[in-house]
Image: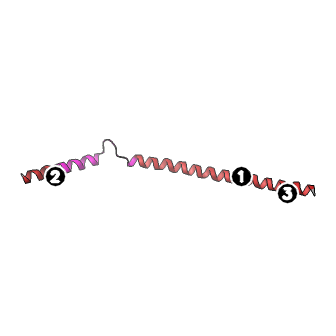
Amino acid sequence: MAQLKVQHHQEELDSVVDQRKRLEDAYEKQRTHLLEREKSLKSELKALAPSASNPVKETVDKAVDAIKDTAKKVVA
């Protein structure tokens, strides 16, 4: 009878240890995925952030100024 209890407890312990290892592996995989996603999103945000010298914005601003000047000349 005591031998059966020992065997049962050992099986339960083995099961708990295996489950803990699976959980740790799953946690580490999810953590790695989230870190990679965070890095990717930060990179994308950095690329989308307005820079000090944005050539497209400068071109648009110049075009708007030119149109305003032309409109002033026509009105005057």
Query: Which percent across, then down, holds residue 50?
Result: 34, 46
Query: Which percent across, then down, holds residue 60?
Result: 24, 50
Is residue 32 located in the magenta-colored stretch of the structure?
no
Asked which secondary structure carries label 2, the reply is: helix
Do callouts 3 and 1 mark residues in contact (Cβ within 8 Å)?
Answer: no
Identified by mark 2, the residue type is Ile
Asked which secondary structure carries label 3, the reply is: helix
Identified by mark 3, the residue type is His
The crowd level at tag 3 (other Cα within 10 Å; few <14, some 14-19, many 20+) is few
Q: Residue at x 88, y 54 (%)?
A: 6
**Which residue is disc 3 drawn over?**
8
**Which residue is disc 2 drawn over?**
67
Asked which secondary structure carries label 1, the reply is: helix
- Answer above or below: position of 19 versus 50: below
The crowd level at tag 2 (other Cα within 10 Å; few <14, some 14-19, many 20+) is few
Q: Choose between 73 and 40: the one closer to the eye.
A: 73
Q: Residue at x 80, y 53 (%)?
A: 13
**Distance from the alpha carbon under mark 1 to that under mark 2:** 69 Å
Identified by mark 1, the residue type is Arg
**Which residue is disc 1 drawn over?**
20
Over which residues does the magenta segment extend? 47-65
In this rendering, the label closer to the viewer, 2 or 3:
3
